[in-house]
Image (cartoon, helix red, strand yellow):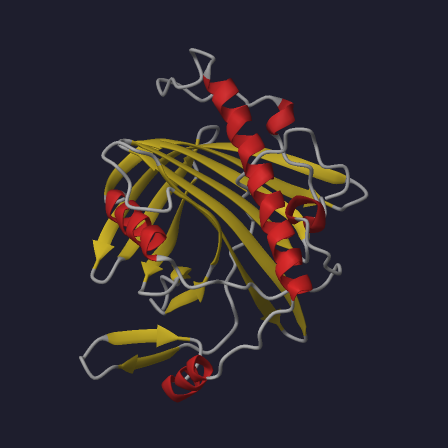
Amino acid sequence: MPGLPQLPPLLLLLALTTSVAAEVYRWTDEQGNVHFSDCPPEDCARQLQDAPPTPSPEDVQRAQERLDRVKQFLRKLDAQREAARADPDSNSTSGPPSPPPRSLQPVCFSDANEWLGAERSQNSFDPISPEPLQSGTHAMLGQLLAGLEGRWDGFVEEYICRGTKAQPQLEHVQHRAELRATSRPTFRVLMESSLRRVDNGVARDALLWLYLNARYLHAGDLDRSSYAERRWVVEIVEAQPKRAAAPGEEKRVIFMRKCRKTQASSSTWHMEVRSIRLQQDELRIDELFFVQNVLAGRRHWQMNR
């Protein structure tokens, strides 16, 4: 993303889904619970038993710098949206939402290094480095997932990057949105959304899983054709508060996930950065989507019960 704008927007939508061409294994544990994963149970167990190498001080410093830049970037976006919401007409849902200021629109094909502060090559990513959740953060995330349950209505601003890096084209689409979040056992939430374009009424659906176990937060999507769940451990960039939230207090998490999509003889890297903010009956979701280390789109959800 060369030439990072003063106030870049958060939440991009990739014009394509981030499905992963990989085998999905279904297995049942001793308690009779059914699990889905991208490795056989014995391989997964072996991965858990093998302790990762201790990172060097330089690795820790680079990771911290990368996360600090993400936090700083997302705080700028929050400040911009708060300023935009000062417009008395900005929260009206009686008609199509007004176009956001150009300063909030993404720079198509911007380099991910400038957004995230990571020294990466154009065609590869550093692996994510999730850390086990602290008890306070785990408690807050449990509250957030439980608070998502129910029906939400609002609008989605979507930006899709087309063309080439030399001649980028930005498509801006506004949707009326309905989101239904259903709680499942063991801190699982299925978020089913229906988007309908304001300009032509074309509709489409999307699915997202959030899953919290004792150590990590997982995020994935669900393939309607096979209902085979794909989950990834995500790297949490920021979580606030780092304790159980008080009644009415805002709960927020920012996380990233990465995957490789393979087709025929080629493969591409996909990365998503999501921010979920929940405060009573107000839900805000920001999404940034990258392909091969460059920005491909963004989405911003503004939802209310």
The C terminus appears in which quarter of the rendering?
top left
- Asked if residue 173 lies left or right of residue 93, the reply is right
Residue 85 on image: x %, y %: 46, 19
The image quadrant that residue 144 belongs to is top left
* Residue under the image location 70 percent in, 32 percent down: 5
Residue 48 on image: x %, y %: 43, 80
Residue 142 on image: x %, y %: 28, 52
Q: Residue furthest front?
A: 57
* Residue under the image location 66 percent in, 44 percent down: 115
- Asked if residue 15 lies left or right of residue 164, the reply is left
Count the numbered circles shown. 0
Q: Residue furthest right?
A: 166
Q: Residue furthest left?
A: 31
Residue 111 on image: x %, y %: 72, 48
Foreground residue, 32 or 96?
Answer: 32
- Asked if residue 266 lies left or right of residue 94, the reply is right
**Residue 232 in view:** yes
Foreground residue, 214 or 29?
Answer: 214
* Residue under the image location 51 percent in, 39 percent down: 299
The N terminus appears in which quarter of the rendering?
top right
The image quadrant that residue 45 belongs to is bottom left
Residue 209 position (above or below residue 285): below
**Residue 98 in view:** no
Q: Residue furthest bottom?
A: 42
* Residue under the image location 28 percent in, 52 percent down: 139
Residue 27 position (above or below residue 118): below
